Image (cartoon, rainbow, N blue to C red):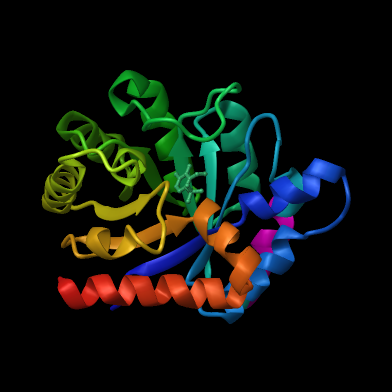
Amino acid sequence: MSVRLHVNVDHVATVRNARGTPYPDPVRAAEECLAAGADGITAHLREDRRHIVDADVERLRALLSRSSRTFNLEMAATDEMVAIALRVKPDVCTLVPERREERTTEGGLDVVAGGERLARQVRALAVAGIKVSLFIAADASQIERSRAAGAVQIELHTGEYAHGHEGELARLADGAKLARAAGLEVAAGHGLTQDNVPALVAIPGIVELNIGHALVSDALFLGLGAAVRAYRAAIGRGERKS
Ligand code: PXP
């Protein structure tokens, strides 16, 4: 089966919110991505609601239910967000670290420091039938603790790889191997582009990519459907290498 492509529509909402208009609508964008073959839609409801807002989450839930595709809600591991997820019931909840002053998610979640409180939140989501994914660095202790905390999936943070840091691809490959051995599904995301996707996808064990900023940027020139197809093609190039 092909590596799953989940499109993050946050930045459609960023453009909308810059002017306070109802357009461009991230839910319409999600519909176009699904029509072009995306396997799912990802959205990050931030504490400050800077892009995706609560009403978007409700509408995305309804759209993804109608389309029988995956709704992945990214959120901080806070009681407010857990309560929202328990009510909305996304298919997947990806827990991410969040700092108000950051431009985007910087670094992975510290599952080790999250301790029992984080494990309790993971359990609450899992009991409600939500698949829990933890957005972490490819670090052995984080991977082991993710499993222990009850996550089904990890999403490896590819920010450093996207910045071209030497040795990152090997680190991600080691992390994916370790996670697979621990019985975890392995997703990846952050800073992914048509250029850096193929080498990443060639890593055995990676089954899902979450891509937002570069895909939405490419869509300005290609259109959203064509951008989704271009990323699908980039995934295909990587799969042929693996
Ligand atoms: N995955 C996670 C967990 C993220 O937090 C983000 C950024 O919101 C992405 C993927 C998408 O990253 P980008 O917008 O750089 O493609």
Eyeballing the image, is 217 above or below 50? Answer: below
138 drawn magenta = no
Q: Is residue 64 visible?
A: no
Q: Is residue 44 left or right of residue 121?
A: right
**Quadrant of the image occupied by residue 137:** top left
Q: Nearer the viewer, residue 17 or 89?
A: 17
Query: Which residue lies at the image location 71% right of the left edge and 36% below the top edge?
Result: 49
Q: Is residue 151 left or right of residue 82?
A: left
Q: Position of residue 132 (x, y in %)?
A: 41, 47
62 drawn magenta = yes
Query: Which residue lies at the image location 19% right of the left edge and 65% below the top edge?
Result: 202
Q: Position of residue 14 (x, y in %)?
A: 70, 46
Eyeballing the image, is 59 above or below 240? Answer: above
Query: Which residue lies at the image location 74% right of the left edge and 45% below the top edge?
Result: 54
Name the outermost residue toward the top.
113
Q: Quadrant of the C terminus?
A: bottom left
Eyeballing the image, is 109 above or below 41? Answer: above
Q: Position of residue 102 (x, y in %)?
A: 55, 26
Q: Is residue 66 left or right of residue 68?
A: right
Main SS, magenta region, reads helix
Q: Position of residue 45 (x, y in %)?
A: 63, 41
**Quadrant of the image occupied by residue 231:** bottom left
Q: Is residue 127 left or right of residue 223?
A: left
Q: Is residue 23 visible?
A: yes
Q: Quadrant of the N terminus?
A: bottom left
Q: Which residues are magenta?
A: 57-66
Name the outermost residue toward the right.
21
